[in-house]
Amino acid sequence: MNMDNESFWEEIPCNICGTKNVDLVFEAGKAQPAKLVRCKSCGLMYSSPRTQVDIDMYESNECDGLLEGVTTDVNHRYRWRLEKESGQVRDFEPTRRILHKLYPEGGRMVEVGSGFGNLLRSFKDEGWDVLGVDPWKELPPHTRDIHGIETIPTTLEKAGLPEASADVIIMLHVIEHVPDPVATLREIHRVLKPGGHAVIETPRYDTVMFKIMGHRERSVKCEGHIYFFTFDTLRRTYEKAGFSKVDTQAVGRTLSAERFLWNVGTISGSTSVRDGLGRMSSTLGLNKLRFSLNLRDMQRVVIRKEDV
């Protein structure tokens, strides 16, 4: 990303309303490097101006061989992410049951931001025809070699998927990272068959936890996040893209004790505390201790493209 470009520092209009009439939520450097604002009309919270977009960083800065040995080396720098994604497949079970009812014979499934491919593998094993899309170019070779799953190494918008070609599109913890959520959802809408479904998961910020923690809340401090949805603003976003709701759940996730302590360190705002907890976790092998935690601070929606 060219940070010298003057347009980079322009205020961002609301993705739902198109207005720049906003209230300040947090000054730059408080929760994020950029300031966070809230649209006065619809309530959408987002960063403005932008200081980074993860997709651009993946496509421009990623080095080759970054994931080499991740499946065999327990000390690999990205082993935590592999273990996290593997452990969280079971968190998807309630939504899996919904999809089984909608598609008892399976169908064509695309996951946007497919990561290491663990969730797609679980559906592939059940007979679904699966495809991954992920801008991290190191991940497609991994999903092909380990899971036998084709993955396109780019963004959904650049993948050029055929119109009306998928029954289900899954996008977990991606929409908060993209620069234009409505445009991304419209592309999902285009790729879905009439009557097809999308599953979107993202953190939510209409929670008691966010009201109490403010800028110290875990998800709002994640520097890759540029949109911060409530139940209402996510609904407004997918409705603007042409979808209707099927199901909404407030969900949690499976965590290792190591990842839990990393989150505690992040909330503390102290790099030394976070790093100290990380060293302690590694010494004690806390990555092997897993548990489920539902603070209702994330939302997962199943939405539908209407029949023509």
Image (tube, rainbow, N blue to C red):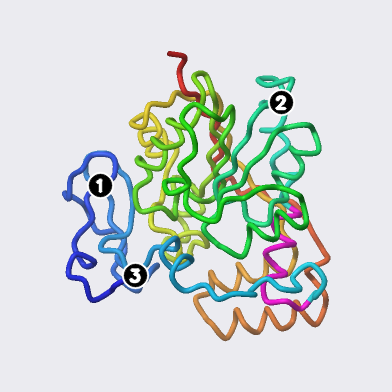
At a point 41% along the width and 37% down the height, the residue shown is: 187
| Nearest to the observer: residue 234 or residue 260 | 234
Q: Secondary structure at mark 2?
A: loop
Indicate the position of residue 42 as horizontal and vertical percent values.
27, 39
Which of the numbered marks, if any, corresponds to residue 106? Answer: 2
* Residue type, mark 3 in image: Met
Labels 1 and 3 touching (C-beta < 8 A): no
Query: Residue 215, relative to residue 307: is it above or below?
Result: below
* Residue type, mark 1 in image: Cys
Mark pair 1, 3: CA separation: 21 Å
Query: Residue 281, relative to residue 226: is it above or below?
Result: below
Mark pair 1, 2: CA separation: 37 Å
Q: Secondary structure at mark 3?
A: loop
Query: Residue 167, relative to residue 159: is it above or below?
Result: above
Residue 304 belongs to magenta span:
no
**Label 1 neighbourhood size at 10 Å, few (<14), some (14-19), many (20+)?**
many
Which of the numbered marks, if any, corresponds to residue 44? Answer: none
Indicate the position of residue 223 as horizontal and vertical percent values.
44, 67
Predominant secondary structure in magenta? helix
At a point 67% along the width and 71% down the height, the residue shown is: 67
- Which residue is disc 1 drawn over? 14
| Nearest to the observer: residue 154 or residue 31 | 154
Label located before the other in sequence (1 or 3) = 3
Which of the numbered marks, if any, corresponds to residue 1? Answer: 3
Q: Is residue 239 left or right of residue 166?
A: left
At a point 49% along the width and 38% down the height, the residue shown is: 161
**Label 2 neighbourhood size at 10 Å, few (<14), some (14-19), many (20+)?**
some
Mark pair 2, 3: CA separation: 40 Å
